[in-house]
Image (cartoon, helix red, strand yellow):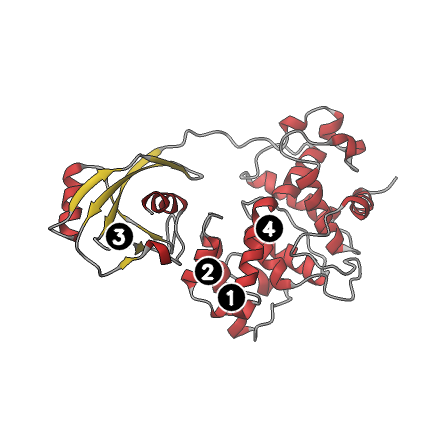
Amino acid sequence: MLDFSSQLLAWFDQHGRTNLPWQATHNMSNSNHPCANVYHVWLSEIMLQQTQVATVIDYFNRFTRLFPTLNDLAAAPEDAVLAQWAGLGYYARARNLHKTAKIIAYDYDGKFPQKFEQVIALPGIGQSTAGAILSLSFGQKHAILDGNVKRVLARYHQVKGHYSQKDTINQLWHLAKQYTPNKRNADYTQAIMDLGATLCTRSKPDCPHCPLAQCCQAKQHKTQRDYPNPKPKKTKPTRSVAMLIYQNVAGEIYLEKRPKKGIWGGLWSFAECEIDMQNITKHIKAFDKNADVTKGLPVIKHSFTHYHLLISPILINCNKSKGFQSIATLKVGLPAPVKKIIAELD
């Protein structure tokens, strides 16, 4: 009987994904040569954190058109990078991507490091991402444990507990390393990610076509829906904020850059304050004592991982021009709700 990795590789040879824009077109099984463009692999791995392939493809293509090489990315202004990332969410990924590009450009002469210890030390790159980059780009033997791999292994062995629990994640890492083969490592890495993305999906896994179904414990016990074990649910709190939309007679709007830490870090947004008329009035008069509130716009609900945000946009007329930007020529990174509000103003 074929072992886990052999079965998976045999399936990959017939059904694996080989036409994604960040993949190489030459034979990935040839470990004597790089398997893919490391810049493209690294970029795709960062984009694919918390985001599905179907969404990432367009972002990846636009990003690489504007920043064709790692050195182009390193030389770009942060605002230009964040502008291309807007809509993908989890903006710390973009800031870390930019930081890493600068480090590689200056400390490694523009060449992506090939030692695991060096790669994992770079901003925004953890154990699994480092393993994926080195495996897919250079054919090195490293285990990975992204969301797809966690799901495959959790079902195959009926691993109890949620990923946030130390014992559970340690068990999954042990299994990931156990199954990682000595040969065709790049193919295996892509294969196990593909299996989770195309067959062993979160809902309605396609077990009849799975090469591992015969020995999968979840399949044998009909517990596919139970694994991976869900994270204990917590009620998300709700926060409220007023967004003050200052617009001058020229139709320009006032935007300010958010702190790098916190939500929408490094993006440009409207001024904010707590929803309290006395507080709102105080903020407006401090900005421009002659400003007038025009109207309130419909409340927008925006959900994050840990809480819901209720945004009350308030349109304000003022006479200032310093710090104001034309809506027609905006080329900065904007949070999705801000982009929505601006589209309604235009």
Residue that mark 2 sits on: 81
Q: Earlier in the sequence, mark 1 or mark 2?
A: 1
Asked if the residue at tag 3 contacts the one at tag 1, i.e. Cβ–Cβ closer than 8 Å, the answer is: no
Label 1 to label 3: alpha-carbon separation: 33 Å
Q: Nearer the viewer, residue 58 or 328?
A: 328
Local secondary structure at mark 4: helix
Q: Are marks 3 and 2 in contact (CB under 8 Å)?
A: no
Q: Circle 1 — which element?
A: helix
Q: Residue at x 22, y 38 (%)?
A: 295
Instruction: From the image, state whether disc 1 or disc 4 is nearer to you.
Output: 4
Task: Identify whether 86 is placed above or below 225.
Answer: below
Query: Which residue position is annotated with label 4?
Result: 57
Camera-side residue of 179 and 40: 40
Residue indicated by mark 1? 73
Q: Nearer the viewer, mark 1 or mark 3?
A: 3
Q: Nearer the viewer, residue 132 or 268?
A: 268
Q: Position of residue 88 (x, y in %)?
A: 49, 48
Relative to 264, 18 lies left or right:
right
- Disc on res. 251: 3
In the picture, the disc for residue 29 is: none
- Structural distance between the alpha carbons of marks 4 and 2: 17 Å
- Spatial CA distance of label 3 from label 2 is 26 Å
Question: Hey, what amino acid is under mark 3?
Answer: Gly
Q: Are marks 1 and 2 in contact (CB under 8 Å)?
A: yes
From mark 1 to mark 4, how far is it between C-alphas? 18 Å
Mark 2 residue type: Val
> Which one is earlier in the sequence, the residue at label 1 or at label 3?
1
